[in-house]
Image (cartoon, rainbow, N blue to C red):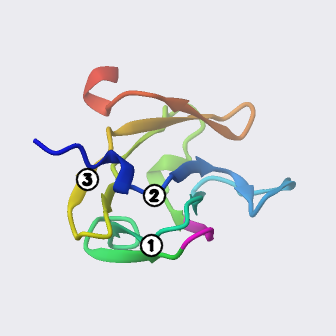
Amino acid sequence: MIDTRDTLPPIHFEITQVIGNNPRFRRRIPNIGLNLSHGGKSLGLARSRYYNGEITWNLNPRTQFFGNLDLPPECEKADMKLTIEVKVMIIDIYKREHDLYPVCFTFNPKKNSWFLEPTSYNELR
């Protein structure tokens, strides 16, 4: 098997309540932000339907994306634990698909912020 990790651009993503890069401006649940940045020099693609995997995102080198989406209304309950699993597939310059390991982000309502859980949702149950 050929090692193709060096063909993958460095992609960083996070779930956040911060708007843009300014921590003074924060979202309120049910609205959440997704920050995605491409830190490399090569072209990259990520599969998404802007959030459900049906549309391919064209990630040009050294670009950042600050997106947002609304959670279902029942997620607004203060006592509800919110955990989101993020799965990313990167398509390299040779059109090969690479699934990154899934990670989760869990919401801390007292701080109105998310923290990384470096594992899949199934492992957190």
Nearer to us: label 2 or label 3 = 2
Q: Which residue is mark 1?
A: 43
Instruction: Please identify the quarter of the rendering in which residue 114 is found.
Output: top right
Q: Which residue is mark 3?
A: 98
Give above or below for 17 relative to 62: above
- 49 on left or right of 28: left
Report the amino acid beneath label 1: Leu
- 102 on left or right of 105: left
- 17 on left or right of 24: left
Instruction: Please identify the quarter of the rendering in which residue 91 is found.
Output: bottom left
Residue furthest to the front in view is: 2
What is the distance, in whole Å, between disc 3 and disc 1 at their CAs?
Answer: 14 Å
From the viewer's side, name the closer residue of 32 and 57. 57
Highlighted magenta segment, given as a residue range: 61-68
Mark 2 secondary-structure assignment? loop
Q: Residue at x 68, y 51 (%)?
A: 17
What is the distance, in whole Å, between disc 1 and disc 2 at their CAs?
Answer: 7 Å
- 39 on left or right of 86: right
- Tell me which secondary structure the magenta stretch mostly adopts: strand
Task: For label 1, count other residues whose C-alpha is less than 10 Å away and answer few (under 14), some (14-19) or many (20+).
Answer: some
Report the amino acid beneath label 3: His
What is the distance, in whole Å, between disc 2 and disc 3 at their CAs?
Answer: 11 Å
